[in-house]
Image (cartoon, rainbow, N blue to C red):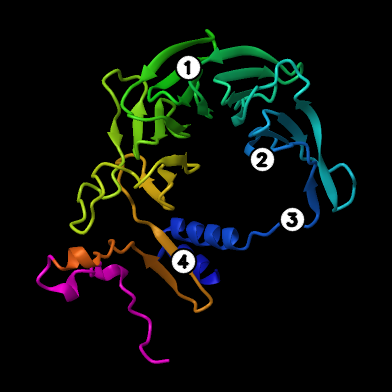
């Protein structure tokens, strides 16, 4: 790490390289906190959690049992060991509880006096935190998979909603109505996220294997769709061009600066994209105890036996060209 700091101070390295290396180190060193526990309230699986961005003190959780819980994460015990207590619950006994699984919960970005939840009961509810009663209820025709409020918006109060219907719904908090739909996906919309950099930019992920980026001020359609092949379909691949994953895209989020978009799919892949151009960055770096940092790129899918039989040069069928800048030039062939 000292080498990174020295290189950065000397202007030899981009500061972003140090940040990535340190972020990777911290992620790989994560472990369960032996001194902190959380009250067990849910009777079924927990689908979603959200911590307020103002104080970082209150945590929402939503479960497959339809229950919503608010926890206080502050330690008042005076001891290192403590349990985060549930301060209030929308439980099964409440007349306002969701009838089916809660898929997303989110604090209102500017005030913990309000939060939003959505559920498989085809509703999205805007809650008053003090009374634990819905101030507004939006009804939809199908299951609600995801919703999101912009963390930076000042010119609109829209909630993006992904449902079983391929159309993305935009709901206005001020008027309490659905004011617009975005059309382009061909299957249910599983995840939606507003950009933390530009308040009118929205990304959506669908079971149609596509991720689309929208400017909600435009009525003509999406800005672009993410393409895992960057427009160059692999000759040894049968996957369709202009898809983000080879399967359902069930998760996405922007990096905190809004410059990149991370997606996950049922193809067991995570991909990092340039949010301005839609380019699949193919950016992965690793550091080890051998004092080296390596840059990795994915190898194209190896052709199977049937495909190889169609090539004259079978020995070269499974190889792919790699940019020399990313080749391993430090390893020794000797043990």
Tell me if label 1 and label 2 are in contact, CB under 8 Å: no
* Residue 61 image point, x, y percent: 68, 34
Image quadrant of residue 189?
A: top left
The disc at residue 286 is 4
Query: What distance separates the C-alpha of mark 4 from that of mark 2?
Result: 33 Å
Q: Residues within 10 Å of mark 3 (few under 14, many from 20)?
A: few
Residue under label 3: 33
Q: Which residue is mark 2?
A: 45
Label 2: few (<14), some (14–19) or many (≥20) C-alpha neighbours in 10 Å: few
Q: Secondary structure at mark 1?
A: loop
Q: Residue at x 38, y 66 (%)?
A: 295
Task: Tell me, yes or no, whether the two marked residues, 4 and 1, touch with CB atoms within 8 Å.
Answer: no
* Predominant SS of the magenta segment: loop
Q: Quadrant of the N terminus?
A: bottom right
- Queried whether the magenta region covers residue 164, the answer comes back as no
Q: CA distance from mark 4 to mark 1?
A: 46 Å
Labelled pair 3, 1 in contact (Cβ < 8 Å): no
Viewport quadrant of the C terminus: bottom left
From the viewer's side, name the closer residue of 65 and 211: 65
Tell me the number on the disc at residue 141: 1
Instruction: Nearest to the eye among marks 4 and 2: give it.
Output: 2
Q: Is residue 321 visible?
A: no
Evaluate whether residue 304 shows in this view.
yes
Instruction: Tell me the distance, in whole angstroms, between the alpha carbons under discs 3 and 1.
Output: 42 Å
Q: Could you tell me residue 95's position as x and y percent?
A: 73, 15
- Which label's residue is closer to the chain start, 1 or 2? 2
Image: 153 above or below 41:
above
Q: Nearer the viewer, mark 4 or mark 1?
A: 1
Mark 4 neighbour class, 10 Å CA radius: few under 14, some 14 to 19, many 20 or more: few
- Residue visible at 35% across and 36% down in the picture: 208
Mark 2 lies on a secondary structure that is: loop
Of callouts 3 and 1, which one flags the residue occurring earlier in the amino acid sequence? 3
């Amino acid at each position: 790490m000292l080498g990174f700091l020295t290189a950065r101070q000397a202007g030899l390295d981009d500061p972003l390289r140090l940040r990535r290396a340190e972020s990777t180190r911290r992620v790989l060193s994560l472990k369960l906190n032996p001194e902190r526990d959380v009250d067990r309230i849910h009777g079924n699986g927990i689908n979603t959690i959200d911590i307020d961005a103002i104080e970082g003190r209150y945590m929402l959780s939503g479960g497959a049992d339809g229950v919503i819980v608010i926890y206080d994460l502050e330690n008042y015990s005076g001891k290192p060991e403590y349990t985060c207590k549930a301060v209030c619950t929308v439980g099964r006994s409440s007349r306002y509880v969701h009838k089916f699984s809660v898929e997303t919960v989110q604090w209102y970005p500017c005030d913990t006096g309000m939060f939003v939840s959505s559920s498989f009961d085809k509703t999205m509810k805007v809650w008053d935190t003090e009374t634990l009663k819905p101030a507004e209820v939006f009804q939809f025709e199908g299951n609600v998979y995801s919703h999101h409020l912009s963390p930076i918006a000042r010119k609109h109060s829209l909630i993006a909603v992904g449902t079983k219907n391929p159309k993305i719904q935009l709901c206005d908090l001020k008027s309490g109505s659905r004011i617009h739909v975005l059309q382009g996906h061909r299957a249910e919309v599983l995840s939606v996220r507003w950009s933390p950099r530009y308040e009118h930019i929205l990304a959506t992920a669908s079971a149609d294997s596509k991720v689309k980026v929208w400017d909600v001020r435009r009525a003509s359609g999406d800005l672009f769709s993410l393409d895992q092949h960057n427009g160059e379909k692999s000759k040894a691949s049968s996957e369709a061009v202009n898809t983000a994953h080879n399967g359902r895209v069930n998760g996405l989020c922007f990096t905190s600066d809004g410059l990149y978009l991370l997606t996950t799919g049922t193809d067991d892949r995570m991909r990092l994209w340039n949010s301005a151009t839609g380019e699949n960055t193919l950016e992965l770096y690793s550091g080890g105890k051998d004092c080296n940092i390596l840059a990795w790129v994915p190898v194209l899918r190896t052709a199977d036996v049937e495909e190889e039989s169609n090539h004259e040069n079978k020995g070269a069928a499974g190889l792919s060209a790699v940019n020399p800048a990313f080749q391993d030039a430090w390893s020794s062939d000797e043990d």
